[in-house]
Amino acid sequence: MVNTGDTAWILTSAGLVLLMTPGLAFFYGGMVRAKSVLNMMMMSFGALALVSVLWVVYGYSVAFGDDVGLGLLGNPGEFFGLAGLMEDTTGEAGGLPAMAFVGFQAVFAIITVALISGAIADRAKFGSWMVFAGIWATIVYFPVAHWVFDFTLTDEDGTVTHTGGWIANDLAAIDFAGGTAVHINAGAAGLALAIVLGKRRGFGREAMRPHNLPLVMIGAGLLWFGWFGFNAGSALAANNTAAVAWVNTLAAAAAATLGWLLVEKVRDGHSTSLGAASGVVAGLVAITPACSAVSPIGAVILGVIAGVLCALAVGLKYALGYDDSLDVVGVHLVGGLWGTVAIGFLADPDAPAGVESLIFGGSVDQLWRQVVGALAVLVFSFVLTLVIGIVIQKTIGFRITEEDEVTGIDNVVHAESGYDFASLGSSGSAAPVAGQVRATSTEGIARSTEGVRA
């Protein structure tokens, strides 16, 4: 029988997580320069559209179909087109309609792909990004989701009815809501693509400040709001585990914000709104794998350390020479690694996951499992993304030309501008001012564009 309360919570959580992708578009969009804002937001919306379709056709089956061997891949044909799931009321957890679980996991796939786009802001062709998004989701995210999120199921007699992925079942690493599958996965991919596409023109020499900090703050707020569905929804029920995950998510994000702002104050002499927004996301990333395994005090400790680590890590791109435009590596890769490994240090046996850690129980058993799981996803994602990126760059081209980058990717790729300043203070019926030249013809527009490029 369908549990209507649990089903309502999961569908609500799915809606909250879906909202995170437009929230990410705001967050990333505000962080880039004005000439790139639409392209940055379109990369998130493009991922939302494409991955949704792929998930329905075969993505869910690859991620949650019965394992075809070694815990690496679900059967792509088992649920092709979601066949056979519309009337199934058992799903991945008793009482949940299968389609509720399908929808909930779909939005995880969407935002994981969208997260990568921040590493290559200002310089990637939109068409090439869409090709990359489809390939990456297919051969990287869907299999990794199978490794991490697909649990082996048994019936009342102990007979295995479904075989899942190796990290969840054989390794038994804990990743409650996606520290490995989402954040380490996207962070490693972002690093690989940043290396393939190279640095933005003027990186390290010119100021590339966020053009709209209120937009960044709005995006961070939407991400924080949606993240409660991300983490608490991963309990797959309206129960105590969901409640603990909710409180831990709140505590860790708040603590990380304070940690990031403290680093800024000590290092730079002032705390910034961009730092506050980034600290929120760093804490949310770090608590994602651990929200069922730590106590609220553990969440605060984990969050503070995440804020400090990520605030320091964003400077690595200048020291090491890679251009991770919006700090996907510094926040998602570093935050995801810390949150995943921290379970081995801070897990509390009294928390819903019920595992001991080095500090609470003196055990290193969970620690090594967490490290192996984190490193496996990191290496897999980085290597495959590097190959995908190089192939796209060598064939259809991934990066726009330097001339187009100077002009602005919004204008060149999308034929739009985020801010139509030319229309301010004028009406369409106003008569031309004597001596004023208006670029209304195609030739006039071309001349104006050439002037901008010059």
Image (cartoon, grey):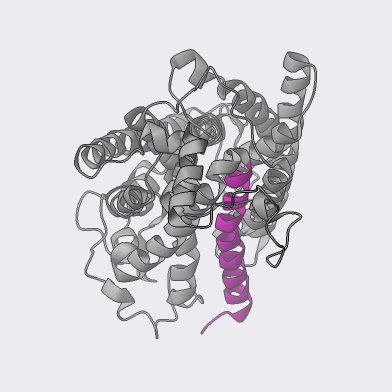
Dominant secondary structure of the residues highlighted in magenta in the image: helix
Residue 66 inside the magenta-drawn segment: no
Is there any visible trace of residue 290 in the rendered image? Answer: no
Residues drawn in magenta: 1-30
Residue 21 inside the magenta-drawn segment: yes
Q: Is residue 113 left or right of residue 421?
A: left
Q: Residue at x 73, y 54 (%)?
A: 424
Is there any visible trace of residue 99 in the rendered image? Answer: yes
Q: Is residue 435 above or below residue 90?
A: above
Q: Is residue 11 left or right of residue 259?
A: left
| Number of disc labels | 0
Residue 202, image x and y in percent?
49, 22
Q: Nearer the viewer, residue 174 or 357?
A: 174
Residue 128, image x and y in percent?
32, 48
Q: Nearer the viewer, residue 279 or 202?
A: 202
Q: Is residue 191 left or right of residue 423?
A: left
Residue 235, image x and y in percent?
57, 60
**Residue sitting at the far front:** 434
Q: Nearer the viewer, residue 82 or 220?
A: 220
Q: Residue at x 62, y 54 (%)?
A: 23
Q: Residue at x 41, y 38 (%)?
A: 404
Residue 233, image x and y in percent?
59, 61
Q: Is residue 216 above or below residue 53?
A: above
Q: Residue at x 45, y 39 (%)?
A: 450
Image quadrant where residue 269 sits: top right
Q: Nearer the viewer, residue 193 or 295?
A: 193
